[in-house]
Amino acid sequence: MEKNLRVCPIDGFYRGFECPKCGQEGRNLMYPDEVDAIGRILAGILRHFPENYGIKLSKNGYAKIYSIVPAIKTQRRKFGWLAPIHIEALGKTDERGRYQVNERGEIRATYDHTIPVILDDLPVDDIPDILYYQTTEEEFSLIRETGISPSDKTYIHLSSTFRKTYVTGLFHVDDPLVIGINTDELRKKIPVYRASKEVYLTTEIPPEFILSIEQEKIELSHEEREEVENYKERRERRILGEKNNLKH
């Protein structure tokens, strides 16, 4: 269910109608379609193409919120109402924990980067002994011998649950294979970082830490099915846009 982004005078930012802490109806900041649109732009700036908006990230991936706002308003004039409070609220209320906002008025994405960033200041505590990685039957025969390295992203992304890993795998293939990673042992040699509530990062996984596990039968919920379909539609639009750009 899509939710408005609001601010409570007592408890701060939240998403929904009533403040989950005090029950008051806070002041509306953004409607769901605005949250979605600005969120996509913000993710692009912090994860993939900051230079397209004239933004420079720190080595740890942070950008000044006060520089993001005019950059978006210049290129997307319909968002002329945008202010730093909207970016701060988006980052602090993201339900997946994809962003960090610091005391210096900066924001960063904590995972999913395709540009060089150094995230070695992320937490390394509370790491589950087993994490999960999505691949395919064909790839599995190779990585059992060679291990896993980052491919299209800066870091290897692992998940805390079989289900989440499987659903994420459906973004890319119709029949993903979920494998286990012995992070209890891996951490003794290579750091594993806690990037969000469900996502963990590392830089390399040698083959001796890869586990073959029993596959679970997953029935997708309506929300999960919609998430997969939306991702595939966005990917098709992006590919089509790239093809059109090549023609011109």
Image (cartoon, rainbow, N blue to C red):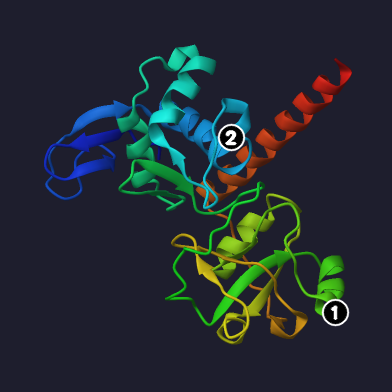
- Residue 50 bears which disc, if any? 2
Question: Quarter of the image holding residue 240?
Answer: top right
Residue sitting at x 79%, y 64% = 136
Residue sitting at x 13%, y 37% = 9
Q: Position of residue 144 (x, y in %)?
A: 81, 78
Q: Position of residue 195 (x, y in %)?
A: 49, 61
Q: Position of residue 104 (x, y in %)?
A: 33, 45
Query: What residue is disc 1 on?
Result: 145
- Nearest the viewer among 196 and 58 is 58
Cα distance between the residues tagged 1 and 2 = 36 Å
- Nearest the viewer among 137 and 204 is 204
Q: Position of residue 124 (x, y in %)?
A: 47, 73
From this view, report whether residue 193 is shown above or below residue 105: below
> Relative to residue 94, is residue 60 drawn left or right?
right
From this view, report whether residue 13 is shown above or below residue 79: below
Element at label 2 = helix
- Amino acid at circle 2: Pro
- If you read the primary sequence from the N terminus, does the residue marked by circle 1 or circle 2 appear first? 2
